[in-house]
Image (cartoon, rainbow, N blue to C red):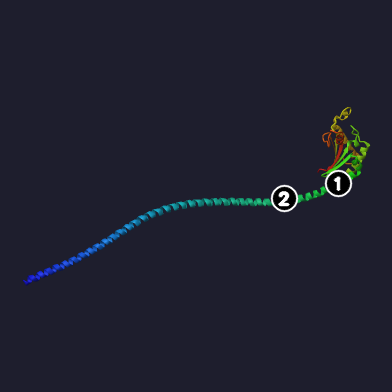
Amino acid sequence: MKFYVKFGLAVIITATLSACVSQSVHQQKLDENQYLQSVIKGLETDYGRLKEDKTQLIERNDSLSQRLLEAIEHSKLLQEDLMRARADLDRVEKVLADRSAEAGAAMTEMRQRIDRLTAESSVLQQQLEAEREAREARLAEVQGTYDELVGKLEEEIQRGEVKISELKGKLTVNVVDKILFDSGKADLKPAGISVLQQIGDILKSAADKNIQVEGHTDNVPISGTLAEKYPSNWELSTARATTVLHFLQTKASIPGERLSAVGYGEYHPIATNGSKEGRAQNRRIQIVLAAQEH
């Protein structure tokens, strides 16, 4: 009986102990399972975050790849632009070098031309100065001749028979025809010879001057028997100018190469032909003294 009782107690104790051990292991398993669930949940959360990061990285990588492609394309375009710019620069440098050489040659030529012009200007200045001095000498000579004529022909000038003028180195002696010629004639009167002799003696000393004798008339036509000898005032004015020229050559000993004669007829009046006084002024002989042309 005691044996059974002891055996029974042993079984109960063993069952009780077994029950206690099983409950402890079970709780441990539950705790482990809960921990594993927590770990799994954390891993799933990390996985989701990593997956999201991966997606973002993929998108960012695609964006960077696109930007890289664009940058490569832009770099290519820049390289092409750079190559073109270098080519343009080479052309510009060549053009500038060529133009620099041309400019240098042009500058050298310009300097040489300036030197030539400077030398020519200097020579011209010397010539102008010499011409000015010669002109002043000629003017002084003409003025001297003018003064001498005025002094010699003072009476004729006062009577209005002779007028003497000087302008820009040209001396003009204007003699009315009535002191030189009778009406319609080309032969010198004694009074005219006296006047011309005085004029010739003075003009002879101006050896570097030419002398032109000009015949002028009024506008009254030649008529009657006189027209047979002088068909128009042209012929009469020319004949009178030629008569004075011959007198200056033969009586005043003025060389023929300094003398010339021209007849202007009625076409160069100095006064109106509408009055007697005006026509009288137009009938004249002009003796023009001017510098010789070289």
Give the secondary structure at mark 2.
Answer: helix
Q: Residue furthest bottom?
A: 2
Q: Is residue 242 above or below residue 30?
A: above
Q: Position of residue 205 (x, y in %)?
A: 88, 45
Q: Is residue 6 left or right of residue 118?
A: left
Characterize the local packing of mark 1: few (<14), some (14-19) or many (20 or more) Cα atoms within 10 angstroms: some
Say which quadrant the C terminus sits in.
Answer: top right
The residue under the point 24% across, 64% down is 32
Q: Are marks 1 and 2 in contact (CB under 8 Å)?
A: no
Residue in front for this viewpoint, 278 or 101: 278
Pointer 1 residue: 143
As drawn, 2 above or below 169: below
Q: Which mark is residue 117?
A: 2
Q: Position of residue 132 (x, y in %)?
A: 80, 49
Q: Name the outermost residue toward the top.
A: 224
Q: Is residue 19 left or right of residue 201?
A: left
